[in-house]
Image: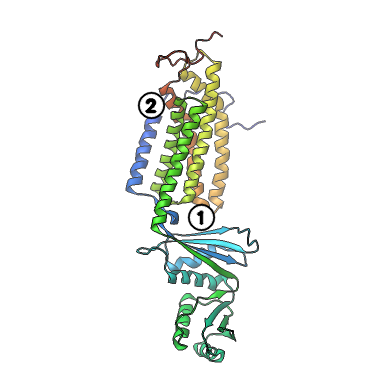
Amino acid sequence: MRLRLVPAETNWDFFKTSTLTLGLSALMMVASVVLFFTMGLNYGIDFKGGTTIRTDAKVEVDVGGYRDAIAPLGLGDVSITEVFDPAKPNLNVTQIRIEAQEGDESVAVKTVADIETVLGEKFGGKMFLAIKAEGISDTDVAKFLTDKGYAADVSKTDTGVLLTFKKGLPTDEAASLKNALADTFKIESIPGYSYELIKFPSVESVGPKVSGELVWTAVEAVIAAIVAVLFYIWLRFEWQFSLGAVVALVHDVTLTIGIFALVQIKFDLAIIAALLTIVGYSLNDTVVVFDRVRENLRKFKKLTLKDVLNLSINETLSRTVMTSVTTLIALIALFVLGGDVIRGFVFAMIWGVIVGTYSSVFIASAILLRLGVKRDWSKKDPKDVGGQYAKIDA
């Protein structure tokens, strides 16, 4: 027995309350615009600027542990993502993204050093400090460390000495020890610590100017997608269908931006990807309905446009609901179990599936009904909306 979420045959009038649904949607769109300009979006690092630190670990990455280690530094928006690097398949690679601190173009060098130290202390295993200085004595350095109460092996190198600690040091101790070594042995600067199990191969910063360009690029991407949809539907159907589909897409995107302004979930490039996915999903639903409308306009020549639209929506309703529900099941599972990294993206998709399904049924078709469909193309009278095939003998 096949599972059905709606009856096999339905005869619901979806336009009985079309004035109410269109009015409610218009009100929600206005509210979304107001929320956007009053509360604003909680922009992520992509749009505010910040710094990305790459880590290469020899052991499995604990994203939650990384986040807990960095949290006491009070750096605000921190995003930690585990990625796969095909060039280094044996390493566990992560990207740590920190928002630009107030008044700074990017994260300060000291802050980056603090992040590396706290991660090295907990996940780095042995800690190394290479001191490059001519004439420095490994014996003197070893005695200095013993006097300070640090257990470390000191070995001579071609350019100086190498300090090896059995485990990492707390941030404050690591910084103060490095400063004490520099003062005692008259060394202008000492490079940062390195670790046995974790490396920090690159640090990249995104300034406010680049972030501003990303905002406009994202806006242009969404607008370009909607314009492409307008053109595609126009070619495949008619301009009335095209306008109905585009109004539905604008409705979906506007309400999605509004809900993000309301709940203040981080808005970054992943959400832009979600918006474009929502556009595609909503368009797919709308095209399915419109395709059935076109078939029924040819099949039922004497039915009014309203009856044809109702019939088409009812005929595709089972498919629409089944597709939306099965998609939502997967998305809700990802939302609950997927973790913080993808939660914003999945939330946008859940909301987009809901409003996209709603707009395909109640917005796009309602706009099409009000615009009318010119069926008899041999007539030049724009009031002739009876149907292209209404004058043909059956």
Q: Residues under labels 2 and 1: Cα distance?
A: 40 Å
Above or below, 392 against 170 in this view is: above
Name which residue lies at 60% across and 74% down: 196
Name which residue lies at 56% across and 91% down: 139
Q: What's the amino acid at mark 2?
A: Thr
Q: Secondary structure at mark 2?
A: helix
Name which residue lies at 38% across and 33% down: 24
Q: Nearer the viewer, residue 381 or 94?
A: 381
Instruction: Point out residue 220 in the picture as x, y percentages from the top left corner.
Output: 43, 43
Instruction: Say which quadrant the C terminus sits in.
Output: top right
Q: Which residue is mark 1?
A: 340
Q: How many residues crowd mark 2 within 10 Å: few (<14), some (14–19), many (20+)?
A: few
- Any mark on residue 6, and which? none
Q: Secondary structure at mark 1?
A: helix
Count of marks placed on residues: 2
Q: Kindly tell me whether residue 362 is visible in this rendering.
A: no
- Any mark on residue 19, and which? 2
Instruction: Point out residue 226 in the picture as x, y percentages from the top left corner.
Output: 46, 37
Instruction: Point out residue 207 in the picture as x, y percentages from the top left corner.
Output: 41, 59
Q: Kindly tell me whether residue 177 is visible in this rendering.
A: yes
Residue furthest out toward the top = 393
Mark 2 and 1 residues: CB-CB less than 8 Å, in contact? no
Instruction: Point out residue 98 in the picture as x, y percentages from the top left corner.
Output: 45, 62
First in residue order: circle 2 vs circle 1: 2
Above or below, 298 against 41 in this view is: above
Q: How many residues crowd mark 1 within 10 Å: few (<14), some (14–19), many (20+)?
A: some
Q: What's the amino acid at mark 1?
A: Asp
